[in-house]
Amino acid sequence: MKRRRWIELVISAAWIGGIAWTANNFLRRASGIRLQLRKIAVGREDELRQRRFLQVEISGRTVHINASSDRLVALDLRCTHGNCTVRYTPKQRHFVCPCHGGIFDSEGQVISGPPTKPLAQVPLRNEEGIVYILDHT
Ligand code: FES
């Protein structure tokens, strides 16, 4: 084997080894990332249904649980236009944003602007009649 060919092989092996080492480190770090998920009990489903709705503070945000329809819906009350906290008006069964007047229905869908996106839904879990919010913040 000529000297030049031998140097090319050594350099190629170093490149491949470096790439393999980098990929290995990346995969080890990526697999170490864990999503923190908290399960927070908010009450018994039958009690929520009697109350029709409940608002709770979780991780600095207000979550509204609507229990007046067939399925329970939890909404993050941060307005999708500018992050103001919307207010629920039980009589009209909708949410009004105090900042620019955006209005959302009881399912969080936009009724009138300026917001264009619905309120974010927060995952719920019902385990043996107890309702939990699944918080991943
Ligand atoms: S922040 Fe809610 S309408 Fe603008």
Image (cartoon, rainbow, N blue to C red):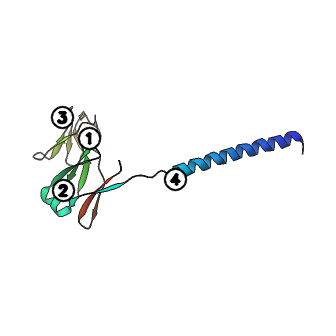
User: Which kind of residue does numbered mark 2 sit on?
Assistant: Ala
Does the Cβ of the disc 3 residue fall within 8 Å of ligand 1? yes
Q: Are marks 4 and 1 in contact (CB under 8 Å)?
A: no
Residue under numbered circle 3: 98
The mark found on residue 78 in the picture is 1
Give whichever of 103, 98 is nearer the camera.
98
- Judged from the image, the secondary structure of the residue bearing numbered disc 4 is helix
Please name whichever residue, 62 or 79, is drawn nearer the observer in this view of the structure. 62
Q: Quadrant of ligand 1?
A: top left
Q: Residues within 10 Å of mark 3 (few under 14, many from 20)?
A: few
| Amino acid type assigned to the residue bearing label 4 in the image | Ser
Residue drawn at point x = 27 percent, y = 58 percent: 132
Instruction: Identify which residue is drawn at 21% across, 36% down.
Output: 102
Q: In this view, does 3 lie above or below 47?
A: above
- In depth, the one of 102 and 38 nearer the eye is 38
**Which secondary structure lies at badge 1?**
loop
Bin the neighbour count of mark 1 within 10 Å (Cα to Cα): few under 14, some 14-19, many 20 and up. Answer: some
Residue occupied by mark 4: 31
The quadrant holding residue 5 is top right
